[in-house]
Amino acid sequence: MRRPAAIASVWLATLFVAAWSYVATMGEAAATLGRDRYRYRIALEGQLARAAKARPGVLWLGDSTILGLRDVSYPQLVHGAAPGVPYQVTGFVGSDFCTYYPFVAALLERTRPLVLVLVAHLRLFDDPQRRGANGAATRKDLLSLVPTSELGCAVRLPFGTCGVTLPRLLLARSLRWDAVERALLVVDGARALVSEARLDSSGARPSSLQAGLDEARRALRGSDVPIASDHPMVRLMEATVALARAVGVRVVVVGTPIPFEAMQRTVGYDPAVYRTRFETLRAAVEQADGVFVDLHEELSTAQFVDRVGHFAKEGAEVLAERLRPIVAAEVQRAQRDRWFQALAAARESAMSRGGVGKSGTRD
């Protein structure tokens, strides 16, 4: 019995030394690739740090359709929707509510904007694990952003659709320590180097042109996502809105435009079906006391720059005109709410300083 145990121990020790030697040798390259693979995490952590410092009144959170990667999008035109209200645009390519919920939970621990504006892109309600490298299936680690006080609520949500299991959740929580996070970048980068070497040797990697063409075809069909009130991503959306509303932050959810005219000409588009889907989103948002703005048929084909759903400047201007008064109204309501909260707190503080006896009269 001792001999097999000794053999197993020696084998494990040898494996550990080999792995450590590889990571040590390839450390810099592995760390660089790890940072590239986790760009979304690094970007979101940076955005959270900036929000905590700048304390924006309006915070926009979305996917690439609002980030202004090609040209300005509507948040860059709406700004804070009211004079003197600072704003910040946050998010990352391919972000959905698997990304939004942890981000918002972490945000509210640091600062509480007057209004939070979220993008609901229908194609990103599809199963994240079918969406490739830019999908939320690669972002299970973001649950480390959720404060411990909110973890009990988070574990009851359907994060399984994002590929989260109990072991992965425990691993994600360990990333709250900087040393563990840095180690993750190196180890995952080293693993990716091995995978890429295998692809290079086998010649199995598709050409970038072919991959781009395949992605374009998938993108146009990507908005055809059947949803219902119990859809995991719909539940995560409702939970994200409720999380912010619970601490007094006003929430606007934008049902982002889809290229419906191009869909009609190619893959098919039934207006009644999509109207029902967006009404399902509206019901979930309003159930959580948020405001839903349905813009799914707002733009013509000429107002998009691609079939994924990114907007031309003209399209962004149309959306900005629609959204500016809505966001401004929510800013005003939030300011009024904060004023009454401050007034109530001041009154309670004054009563506490004056002292009230048990009989109900001042001592």
Image: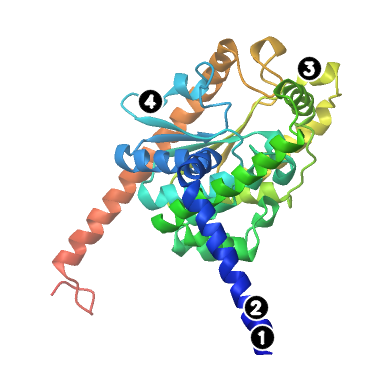
**Residue 244, image x, y percentages:** 48, 49
**Which element is circle 4 on?**
loop
Residue type indicated by callout 1: Arg
Residue on which the image places disc 1 = 3
Q: Is residue 36 left or right of residue 275?
A: left
Q: Earlier in the sequence, mark 3 or mark 1?
A: 1
Q: State the SS at label 1.
A: helix
**Residue tagged 3:** 262
- Distance from disc 3 to disc 2, alpha carbons, whole Å, reads 64 Å
Labels 3 and 2: the sequence-earlier one: 2
Residue 344 in sight in this render: yes
In three-dimensional space, the C-alpha distance between marks 1 and 2, rounded to whole angstroms, equals 6 Å
Q: Nearer the viewer, mark 1 or mark 4?
A: 1
* In the image: residue 318, left or right of residue 346: right
- In this picture, is 4 found above or below 294? below
Q: Which residue was labeled with disc 2?
A: 7
Point out the tag, 4 or 2, that comes first from the N-terminus: 2
